[in-house]
Image: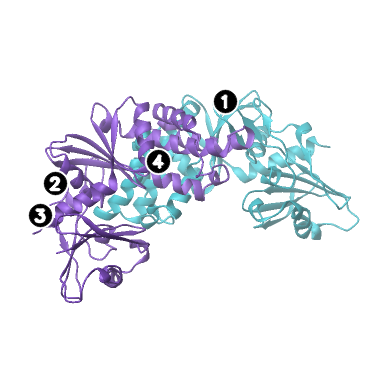
Chain colours: A purple, B cyan
Amino acid sequence: MNWVAIDWGTTNVRFWLMSEEGNIVSTKASPMGMNRIKKDQYEDHLLANIGEWFEPSDSIQVIACGMVGAANGWVEAMYQKVPCEPISNEKITKAPTGFPSLDVRIIPGIANYSPNHDVLRGEETQICGFLTENPDFEGVLCLPGTHTKWVEIKSGLVMGFRTFMTGELFDVLGKSSILRHSIDSNSWDENEFMSAIEVSLSKPEELTTRLFSIRAESLIGDLKTDMASARLAGLLLGSELAGSKSYWEQNRVVIIGSGQLAKNYYDGLIVTSTKSEIINSESCTLKGLIQTKNNSR
Amino acid sequence: MNWVAIDWGTTNVRFWLMSEEGNIVSTKASPMGMNRIKKDQYEDHLLANIGEWFEPSDSIQVIACGMVGAANGWVEAMYQKVPCEPISNEKITKAPTGFPSLDVRIIPGIANYSPNHDVLRGEETQICGFLTENPDFEGVLCLPGTHTKWVEIKSGLVMGFRTFMTGELFDVLGKSSILRHSIDSNSWDENEFMSAIEVSLSKPEELTTRLFSIRAESLIGDLKTDMASARLAGLLLGSELAGSKSYWEQNRVVIIGSGQLAKNYYDGLIVTSTKSEIINSESCTLKGLIQTKNNSR
């Protein structure tokens, strides 16, 4: 029987119609992420998107990950605590549905209380998918995003992790701070990016003065917008690499990501002389959802 | 003859009607800062505000500082370069006016090219005002604001300075990032503020992960909004103090500021065991404008 895999994030949703054997039959996307939808609208929005994939008499099984399980999502799937398997079958939360033959299971996120409070939600499914294919992996996973996660894996368990706000800082500084006058997020200068990482990695305490210097150099120097964007990204990533040193130092690092962002982290790790590899994140998400479906039989 | 002193900033304007002897005769304020006014509207806006202070036949002399002299202001008052006096009489720029008996002089900002590009505009007038009263001062001035300046003074000259985006970061993170859900900018916890400064000062490389931890602790811990605001402010100020160490270490520090913000810097410097004193910034601005008027006779 076909079933539905969902990655329901903050700003958008991805639906996959999957065969029993774990093959993709069809896909859909929607912009109705957690930010744009109320608790009592999830079921209707789900059925509006996946309804055409089923007959009215079908039972529909859905496995979902992401912000759909947050306190402000459909139903709160309470965090697991580290150390833990990325996904534990008994912690999966059933969403309340009005349509009786609709069965929706939501994967919980993971909480970390040391050295600081930290949370992830959605990434546990990518980690699960990665470990399904690499069950003996020990080392560090880096999951770049708005809030990048550095995750320590040992014996199939998530031992601990830390989140860095790098992506969101790039976004809010580029859009809402004085730096918006100096940067163009659509252009790039790779040399500037690499040298900014190096500077910020060695002097992370100067981050907030070097950020202002981007503005100053575009006023009194000849800093072009492509160099300014790359420098902003590089300064922020360099600071993150300084703070995540205990993760990447002397460890095998796998980046679970895609596109330019994953490449930025790969390049950044080169500055620290750390060799890494990139594994596609969407593929990991889907494998994690399939694994969860298989375990829930 | 009465004259007019103006501090024309990014978001608002302050007008003072001054007597020949340097006493305040009357004051006005306007929200038409540089951000809300076009180049060709300055003269009209000025006359609309100060017109009632003069007879039509009067000659009007105006001394202005701040963003009115930026490239996007009334007329660009080109930056002086360090080392320099805070205000040099011959660098003051005359604004173009249609009204022949209106004489407007704009004070230029200061540029720094080492160790990084940096600029200030408006603070030079406060520095001038401070040095007018403390001509023998040698040490460091800290001018807190949206973009806080640390300024080295020697022999009456501005030797160099660095800007930290701390204030603007607090603002954009509190309003436009995920932290907006966790903080309340109107509340405060002093103990949390002081301990966040200490943490960030000793581990500035962890700034962007500790920022995210504020959100996580409000989700899975018991972090209240007043503690969260104070922690955000403390983490950012601790990072600034780490980066400005060469300024405050072994130096006499005078904070030119006012209100809670100046007190925050005073308290932050206590964490570093640095004794400082606070001098009122508006009073320094006015003294700087008076000094400039006196020098321009």
How far is disc 1 from disc 2 in space, using C-alphas?
Answer: 51 Å
Q: Which mark is residue A260?
A: 4
> Where does the C terminus of chain A fall, quadrant-wise?
bottom left
Secondary structure of residue under mark 2: loop
Callout 3 amino acid: Asn
Q: Chain of mark 1?
A: B
Q: Single out the mark in the foreground, 2 or 4.
A: 4
Question: Quadrant location of residue B52?
Answer: bottom right
Callout 2 amino acid: Glu
Residue assigned mark 3? A295
Decide which of tag 4 and tag 3 comes sooner along the chain.
4
Residue B259 relative to residue B285: left or right: left
Callout 4 amino acid: Gln
Residue A227 relative to residue A158: left or right: right
Decide: is A169 above or below B89.
Answer: below
Residues at marks 2 and 4 touching, judged by CB atoms closer than 8 Å = no
Q: Please provide percent x and percent y for residue B182.
A: 35, 55
Q: Tell me what residue is drawn at x 71 percent, y 48 percent.
A: B6
How far is disc 2 from disc 4 in space, using C-alphas?
Answer: 29 Å
Decide which of tag 2 and tag 3 comes sooner along the chain.
2
How far is disc 2 from disc 3 in space, using C-alphas?
Answer: 13 Å
Q: Please provide percent x and percent y for residue A3.
A: 18, 63
Residue assigned mark 2? A85
Both labels 2 and 3 in a single chain = yes
How far is disc 4 from disc 3 in space, using C-alphas?
Answer: 34 Å
How far is disc 4 from disc 1 in space, using C-alphas?
Answer: 32 Å
Q: Single out the mark in the foreground, 1 or 3.
A: 3
Q: Tell me what residue is drawn at x 33 percent, y 34 percent.
A: A243
